[in-house]
Image (cartoon, rainbow, N blue to C red):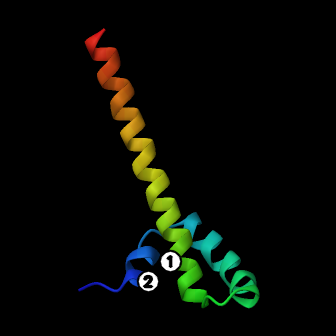
Amino acid sequence: MADPVNLGQAGLQGWRATVGNRVAPPVANRSPLTEDQVRAIVGAAFFVLSVLYVVKTVSAAARQLRS
């Protein structure tokens, strides 16, 4: 079974990885989370936002096709 931290970090590609790497140390210093956990949360957030964008785009396209 895949590790949740590794799954979350899979969402960090390109500029998103830069954001995750910059945000992780200060947040980890101020919270009980490790840097890897912070990166995983940031990656998961980017992944969820991407999925929502695709769903909204497909939904809008389907609405236009029906009308």
Mark 2–mark 1 distance (CA, rounded to whole Å) = 5 Å
Q: Is residue 62 left or right of residue 60?
A: left
Q: Residue at x 49, y 52 (%)?
A: 49
Circle 1 residue: 40
Figure label count = 2
Q: Is residue 65 left or right of residue 56?
A: left
Badge 1 amino acid: Ala
**On the image, which quarter does residue 39 sit in?**
bottom right
Q: Residue at x 38, y 81 (%)?
A: 4
Q: Residue at x 44, y 60 (%)?
A: 47
Q: Quadrant of the N terminus?
A: bottom left
Label 1 SS? helix
Residue 41 coordinates in the image, percent (x, y) = 53, 73
**Mark 2 Cα-neighbour bin, 10 Å: few <14, some 14–19, many ≥20:** some
Residue 42 coordinates in the image, percent (x, y) = 56, 70
Which residue, as the protein is rendered here, is positioned at the far front? 32
Q: Are marks 2 and 1 in contact (CB under 8 Å)?
A: yes
**Mark 1 Cα-neighbour bin, 10 Å: few <14, some 14–19, many ≥20:** many
Q: Which numbered tag is attached to residue 5?
A: 2
Label 2 SS? helix
* Whether residue 45 is situated above or below residue 52 in the rendered picture: below
Q: Is residue 66 left or right of residue 15?
A: left
Which residue, as the protein is rendered here, is positioned at the far top? 67
Q: Residue at x 69, y 76 (%)?
A: 23
* Whether residue 15 is situated above or below residue 7 in the rendered picture: above
* Whether residue 21 is situated above or below residue 36 in the rendered picture: above
Badge 2 amino acid: Val
Residue 58 coordinates in the image, percent (x, y) = 33, 33
